[in-house]
Image: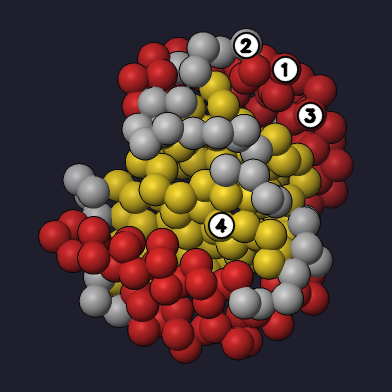
Amino acid sequence: MYVRTTYATGDPARLDSVAEAISTEGRRLLSEEPGYRGMGLFVDRELGKLLVGSWWEDEESLRASDDHLRERRAELLAPFAGTVATDSWEAAVVSPPESLGPRAGFRLVRLEFDPADTDRLVETFREAALPGLRKIPGFAGVSLLVDRAGGRASVGAFYTDREALAASRGAVAAVREKATAQARVITRSIEEFEVLVARVAGRS
């Protein structure tokens, strides 16, 4: 599968109304596109950050949907977004959450690496990082998204609630330290969000 992410920042006071529009009208528009497989919507109300991920069956569907929806996406984001960044990714490892409650949390880690090491990263994540994450209380699911040409990746992990998200930080740091050394990657940023929507490949 392939994923398009849209990362927007703006005035926190304007975030909720735009998030509501994306979770309703935005999701409806996405669902009408061929190859659509799901959507994630995440917010940081304190700082004013919004992250949307849309999932697609193949690269062709991802590109076609972007052509169709680019203007409408900009219109939906406009009341909130002061900055917008859109990226396309290959979903290299996907372990989606089976179910999430209303207080679920999400951690996003951005990575950088030599493009020649992409397969090494994917194998390390699948064989070393994922088993370690699954042992952490409250862990609910995770995806590794990669940009092979650009040498970039992002890891998005779900937790059952925000208390579990906070409590996991130490254990996750240990997993991350070992896996990044083995995969020869650099951690560029770590962010945490509230989960508003998480429906991927027919799952909630």
Q: Which mark is residue 135?
A: 2
Q: Earlier in the sequence, mark 3 or mark 4?
A: 4
Q: Bin the neighbour count of mark 4 within 10 Å (Cα to Cα): few under 14, some 14-19, many 20 and up.
A: many
Q: Which mark is residue 110?
A: none
Q: CA distance from mark 3 to mark 4?
A: 23 Å
Marks 3, 4: nearer the viewer: 4
N-term-proximal mark, 1 vs 3? 3
Residue 133 in sight in this render = yes
The reply to whether callout 1 and callout 2 are in contact (CB within 8 Å) is yes
Please tell me whether residue 79 is drawn above or below residue 162 in the rendered image.
Answer: below
The residue under label 2 is which amino acid type?
A: Lys
Q: Element under label 4?
A: strand
Q: Amino acid at mark 3?
A: Arg
Q: Which residue is mark 3?
A: 126
Q: Residues within 10 Å of mark 2 (few under 14, many from 20)?
A: few
Dot placed on the residue nearer the N-terminal end, 2 or 4: 4
Whether residues under marks 1 and 3 lie with C-beta atoms below 8 angstroms apart, the answer is no
Q: Along the line of sight, which residue is nearer the eye, 81 or 23? A: 23
The answer for how far apart the CA atoms under marks 2 and 4 are is: 26 Å
Q: CA distance from mark 1 to mark 2?
A: 7 Å
